[in-house]
Amino acid sequence: ELKVEQNPLFLSMQEGKNYTIYCNYSTTSDRLYWYRQDPGKSLESLFVLLSNGAVKQEGRLMASLDTKARLSTLHITAAVHDLSATYFCAVDISFQGGSEKLVFGKGTKLTVNP
Amino acid sequence: ETGVTQTPRHLVMGMTNKKSLKCEQHLGHNAMYWYKQSAKKPLELMFVYNFKEQTENNSVPSRFSPECPNSSHLFLHLHTLQPEDSALYLCASSQSTGGEIQETQYFGPGTRLLVL
């Protein structure tokens, strides 16, 4: 059974600080997604990582993928309050020719304090 | 309307009721998905429709019945639900090219369901 584990599950940090969220998964996959969810809202796509060594950056967030280690990281640089949300990683375990099938981690609830 | 829309946004139903959730995508995608998001559990994939054909049923109880009349609309018919079915039900869509690299899934706002 595929397991997708995120850590930490809860993260409280101060504005201006840096931190990394980790996403480990237990099966072979070369596609990984990061989503953001604000309270009471739906999921918003942040990054799509499609190959080993992929690195993508958007503003204060940077995501990377190491398919050999089955690890993705989401790095937060100089956090601001607006980044407070829950962040999910999702691993694509589609079979060849089949539909996309995502398995999600439990999410990391990030709170950025002034 | 743009993106993925869902109605109703909130629903309260008794265990003997029958109700339906509706999802519509305005993105020209050909794959649609139902997910369940419960408190303290990871987001769970329930059903996948690809080119209107159901390609995935993730061991979902028969009291949940999906319907996909065309590539833009997806329904989830509910009957004789249990209190533990209370959750946020999210619909998503994506463009599937039959195994090639696929775009990310776009999610609707969800239907918050409470079963009494």
Image: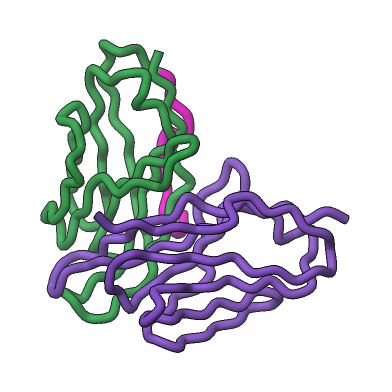
* Image quadrant containing the N terminus of chain A: bottom left
Q: Depth check: give the residue in front, B112 or B4.
A: B112
Q: Is residue A19 visible?
A: yes
**Quadrant for the C terminus of chain A in the image:** bottom right
Q: Please check the rendered image and state whether residue B92 is part of the magenta-colored stretch, yes or no.
A: no
Q: Residue at x 70, y 55 (%)?
A: A84
The reply to whether residue B28 is visible in this rendering is: no
Q: Which color is chain A depicted in?
A: purple
Q: Which residue is pictured at 48% across the width and 65% down the height?
A: A23
Viewer-closest of B5 and A113: A113
Name which residue lies at 46% across and 86% down: A54
From the top left corner, tell me how far across and down residue B26 is, in percent: 37, 59
Q: Residue furthest right?
A: A114
The magenta-colored residue range is B1-12
Q: Position of residue A82 (x, y in %)?
A: 75, 59
Count the numbered circles shown. Answer: 0
Q: Position of residue A96 (x, y in %)?
A: 14, 74
A32 sits to left or right of B101: right
Asked if the magenta segment contains residue B11, the reply would be yes
**Which is more toward the observer, A9 or A90?**
A9
Up/down of A35 relative to B73, above or below = below
Residue B58 image offset from top left, x and y in percent? 20, 46
Quadrant hosting residue B95: bottom left
Residue A28's quadrant in the figure?
Answer: bottom left
Front residue of A16 and B102 = A16
Q: Colour of chain B?
A: green
The residue positioned 79% from the left and 64% from the top of the image is A80
Q: Is residue A49 above or below residue A108?
A: below
What's the colour scheme?
A: by chain
